[in-house]
Amino acid sequence: MNIITERLSISSVQDQDIGSCVSLFGDPIVMEKFSEAPRTLEEIRQRVENCWITQWQSGIPYSGLVVSKNDTDEFLGF
């Protein structure tokens, strides 16, 4: 799934997005907002791989979305 606006792209999480998602989940300030935050890098990686990507590949495109800037491809969040 892809949604493209003038400035942003929103797309389903892909394998190549795992590193960016793991980095964001690893930020303590971001994780203060999650009630059931994964605690280790392995838990973070498993959540991204097993949940979002598996669901997306199963035809559920809205299970995890990645937002990036069009002009730089900079990862902004999910």
Image (cartoon, helix red, strand yellow):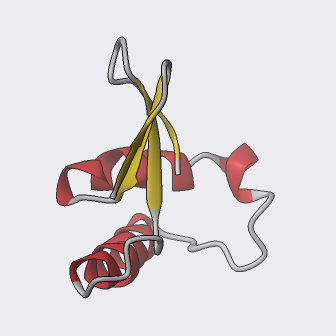
- Residue 77 location, x and y as percent? 53, 43
Q: Determine the image quadrant of residue 35.
A: bottom right
* Residue at the (47%, 71%) spot, across then down: 62
Q: How many marks?
A: 0
- Residue 76 location, x and y as percent? 52, 33
Judge left or right: residue 33 versus residue 37: right
Q: Is residue 4 above or below residue 51?
A: above
Q: Determine the image quadrant of residue 43.
A: bottom left
Say which quadrant the N terminus sits in. bottom left
Is residue 20 or residue 74 the one in the foreground?
Answer: 74
* Residue at the (60%, 46%) spot, across then down: 27
* Residue at the (21%, 79%) spot, across then down: 57
Q: Is residue 35 above or below residue 3?
A: below
Is residue 18 or residue 44 the one in the foreground?
Answer: 18
Q: Is residue 34 above or below residue 17?
A: below
Judge left or right: residue 57 versus residue 44: left
Q: Is residue 77 above or below residue 72?
A: below
- Residue 5 location, x and y as percent? 48, 29
- Residue 13 location, x and y as percent? 34, 59
* Residue at the (38%, 70%) spot, across then down: 48
Is residue 18 or residue 65 the one in the foreground?
Answer: 65
Judge left or right: residue 56 versus residue 27: left
